[in-house]
Image: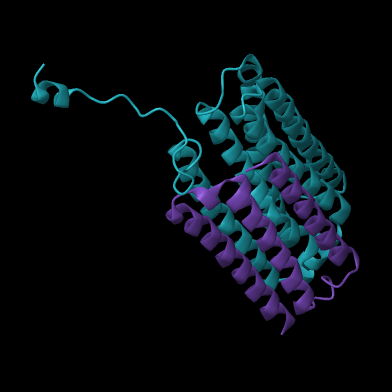
Chain colours: A purple, B cyan
Amino acid sequence: MTARRINVIWAVLLLATALTWWLGESGSATRAELASAAIVLGLSALKGALIVLDYMELRHAPALWRRLLLGWLAAVVLLLLAASAWHAR
Amino acid sequence: MTGAATAALPLPPAPDTPQAPAQRLPGDLVVWLLVLLELLTFGMLFVAFAGARLRDPALFAAGQATLDLNSGALNTVLLVSASACAARALHAVRASHSRAGARWLLAALAFGLGFLGVKSLEYVHKWQEGLDVAENTFAMLYVGLTGFHFLHAAVGCLLFALLWAPTRRGAYGPGNCHALETVTVFWHMVDLLWMVLFPLVYVLR
């Protein structure tokens, strides 16, 4: 883990946040569009994965922990996506 | 000394030296167990929020309309930046730059306190608007979910504050930053939870 890598991830996290904010601001999430919800949740998953793998350093840790945390992230995001899909039906 | 006598002596705990890149869990195992517990607890709260929204979309739409997206986005920026600074602090300490590490830790604390400040303002506004936590499911889940998260962020800030002086003194260094790793793991959990909370509560309607 280099300082540069930490900074790059910081920039990516900020960019993903800006994108999420813009999607919220544009109102597409309010119109309950499933595609918009999927993008927003996808961005959450991306940000979460970066935090888990790089900031929490699980990329170089025993696989069990990496799988537990990424598994949690995937399960939560999928459940929330399912809720959005149900709402949009 | 016979082999049997030395074998009966308890071994001292292994020093916290970095092993080969493939297999190392940073920080204390206890914090990771705590992380798992909190992820499960918040996971249930997230699902409860989404589920309650499905059951009463109108109530949640009305409630979420009173929330400030900009404040939520700002808070995301603050938390993410605190995490980045915490990571930089750990990196500096591992490279024997304790003074720089302490400065990064202070920056992380500042961002964390910023989050608590913005969130507190939001709660004050909500209280002035007459939000009653017992009034309806939305209010209860909004306050419960974000409030529980707020407490965790506050603990994270406290941990940063507690570790600042030892870090500056040079108490930690390469192969000896167990406490710092533990605290940063806890903070990254706070950030990780918000990565789901922010879209769930502030964006998705």
The answer to whether B91 is drawn above or below residue B3 in the figure is below
The answer to whether B65 is drawn above or below residue B132 in the figure is below
Q: Is residue B73 visible?
A: yes
* Residue, far bottom: A89
The answer to whether A23 is drawn above or below residue B96 in the figure is below
Q: Is residue B144 visible?
A: no
Q: In the rendering, at what x and y percent does residue B105 appear?
A: 70, 29
**Quadrant the C terminus of chain B occupies:** bottom right
Q: Nearer the viewer, residue B141 or B38?
A: B38
Residue at point 8% right, 20% down?
B2
Residue at point 75% right, 49% down?
A8
Q: In the rendering, at what x and y percent does residue B65 appear?
A: 85, 62
Quadrant of residue B10 in the image? top left
Q: In the rendering, at what x and y percent does residue B199 appear?
A: 74, 60
**Quadrant the N terminus of chain B occupies:** top left
Q: Nearer the viewer, residue B23 or B77?
A: B23
Residue B139 placement, left or right of A71: right
Q: In the rendering, at what x and y percent does residue B143 appear?
A: 71, 49
Residue at point 57% right, 40% down?
B185
